[in-house]
Image: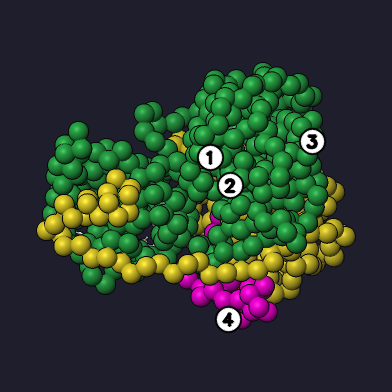
Amino acid sequence: MKFLVCISKTPDTTTKIGFVDGNTRFDTERVQYILNPYDEWYALVRAIELKESNGGSVTVINVGSAANDAIIRKALAIGADDAVRINAEDTDAFFVASQIAAHAKDNAFDVIFAGKETIDYNGSEVPAMLAEMLDMPFVSYASHLDLAGNEATISRDIEGGEEVVSVQTPFVVSAAKGMAEQRIPNMKGIMMSKRKPLNVVEPTAVEATSVISSYTLPPAKSEVKMVDPENMDELVQLLHNEAKVL
Amino acid sequence: MSVLVFAESPSGKLKKSAFEAVTYGKKVADAIGTDLVALTCGPVEGAEALGKAGAAKVLNIADASLAKFDSQCYAAAIAEAANQAGADVVVMAHNSYGKSLAGRVAVRLGASCVSGVNSVPTVDGGFKVKKNVFSGKAVAEYELKAAKKVLSVMPNTFPVEEGGADATVEAISVSLPAPRITVKEVKTVEGSVPLPEADLVVSAGRGLKGPENWGMVEELAQLIGAATACSRPVADVGWRPHHEHVGQTGVAIRPNLYIAIGISGAIQHLAGVNSSKTIVVINKDPEAPFFKAADYGIVGDAFEVVPRLIESVKTFKAGQN
Ligand SMILES: Cc1cc2nc3c(=O)[nH]c(=O)nc-3n(C[C@H](O)[C@H](O)[C@H](O)COP(=O)(O)OP(=O)(O)OC[C@H]3O[C@@H](n4cnc5c(N)ncnc54)[C@H](O)[C@@H]3O)c2cc1C
Ligand SMILES: Nc1ncnc2c1ncn2[C@@H]1O[C@H](COP(=O)(O)O)[C@@H](O)[C@H]1O
């Protein structure tokens, strides 16, 4: 089995957010970047587990600049066999999906994993676009995935519960919590990751279809109103009369 | 030209999110000065009611292969319906349907796509629409450059408006690929409101000490008709089911009321709840970071405050009847 895992980088949630160039561009100065948790903890680890039990290989792919090599090496240290970096800024989801699709078309992957969304822009767009470009079935927000031969049984999160589906390879799946447990790279993995192949590929010519024109900060939250813990009648009145939610 | 809204109907029923999407779609159609057409796929009851929320007409594709969800078949159906209706803009809810479909439909139509939007687009000087990014720490305005657009709208953002009249439902047929996904089972919790769709949510964290103490959380939730939620460590240790976990790595919600009991308010927790319209925090530690994100704060022991709150709600409800 050949597994492909799409990995992205994202600012750590605790990072302070700022903008430059008249609030048209995200300020990347001093930003601490991490591997997107859904890609790292769930998609990548499940792919590695399946390789360990079924044989095969795990390739990670990222669309981004050389600055991303650190997070790609981390994925290799966790246990991916090799990596591909498409050498281009990830301008929009359509651009990213087009690049990954161009690479996947020639490489006959059996399962293509992605995260359910990136935690910075929360798109949930790349995996769906990729599936459409590759004419493959797509299961989103998967919390369990078992593979028997060419048939996968997958549970996916839906509103207030889950749906269990089966699908034949090849397919695209986006991973949510539950699919695997986070793995911390060990010393051996980190040493080996330095020697694993990281192939840099030039992008195919595609135009982004959307662009962020400006950023604004959300309106400031009004001061918290403290309520006496002895007086819950007052809270109920505030929720009824002022907040109008009860 | 028109706007097409995909209104999902799991098990043949239109949910609140579908009416919200139509309500939003009507605002989009008004902004660009055109009509709104709603689309339902597979079996559906009461589709004419989508007219009340603003659909000028409702299309239905009654194909048997749409009775169960396969993103590929649904995307083909929506894209073809958009073409038949001459729609330049396709709208859907940013839920388990929209998250599987928006990107697929956009690729099929050659459209620009923005998911999880929370504003009505502006159309002077380019088609622009906003969404929250960076865990609610900023708002980004996107410009969609392609002639066609796909938007998925954040749930609980545009309350359902039902001023209009029933619409006529027209069956259309489209050619669809054979489903390649077999839905074997759909497990949903009966009777309760799914968390992502709940207007009111009562949530608790590690401050409650153990699963045996959730009785008061459930009682409060039931009294006010709320869904229950929890912080991540609570789900991780199995005190509560995983689908109740809210936050950056769990479900993101934006109810009208979020009551947080014994939750510290870590940034990763806030990431999933800070778009809630009203936040009440009950915590015994006055320094808990959650108070900074709260509208109403109560410093006190949950084991005393929550039973008191339950009594006050009961008195209030009794007074209302
Ligand atoms: C990458 C990453 C992703 C994460 N994703 C999430 C996520 O999605 N969701 C999430 O929730 N967390 C997430 N976390 C974890 C998060 O950082 C916090 O550790 C977690 O939210 C803390 O949960 P808690 O508030 O229930 O527990 P604690 O931090 O232990 O807080 C318990 C609170 O209860 C109060 N308390 C104790 N006893 C009482 C009492 N008797 N009455 C009233 N109050 C009391 C305490 O004062 C304290 O504030 C993530 C962490 C990381 C690193
Ligand atoms: N630049 C990128 N390179 C590789 N994969 C990506 C990139 N951006 C997003 N992805 C994948 O697509 C998933 C969803 O991203 P998004 O649609 O942007 O929310 C991520 O979790 C990744 O698996």
Which is nearer the N-term, disc 3 or disc 2?
Answer: 3
Nearest the camera: A79 or A180? A180
Residue type at the position of mark 2: Val
Disc 4 residue crowd, few under 14, some 14–19, many 20+, Cα 10 Å: few
**Mark 3 and mark 4 residues within 8 Å of each other at the beta carbon:** no
Residue bearing mark 2: B153
Residue bearing mark 4: A30
Report the Cα–Cα distance between label 1 and label 4: 40 Å
Nearest the camera: A85 or B216? B216
Q: In what element is the residue under mark 2?
A: strand
Residue type at the position of mark 3: Gly
**Mark 4 and mark 2 residues within 8 Å of each other at the beta carbon:** no
The residue positioned 75% from the left and 62% from the top of the image is B125
Please name which of the two marks, 3 or 4, marks the residue nearer to the observer.
3
The chain under label 3 reads: B
Residue bearing mark 3: B86
Report the Cα–Cα distance between label 4 and label 2: 32 Å
Residue bearing mark 1: B20
Report the Cα–Cα distance between label 3 and label 2: 21 Å
Q: Which mark is residue B177?
A: none
Chain represented in yellow: A
**Mark 1 and mark 2 residues within 8 Å of each other at the beta carbon:** yes
Report the Cα–Cα distance between label 3 and label 1: 22 Å
The residue positioned 26% from the left and 72% from the top of the image is B287
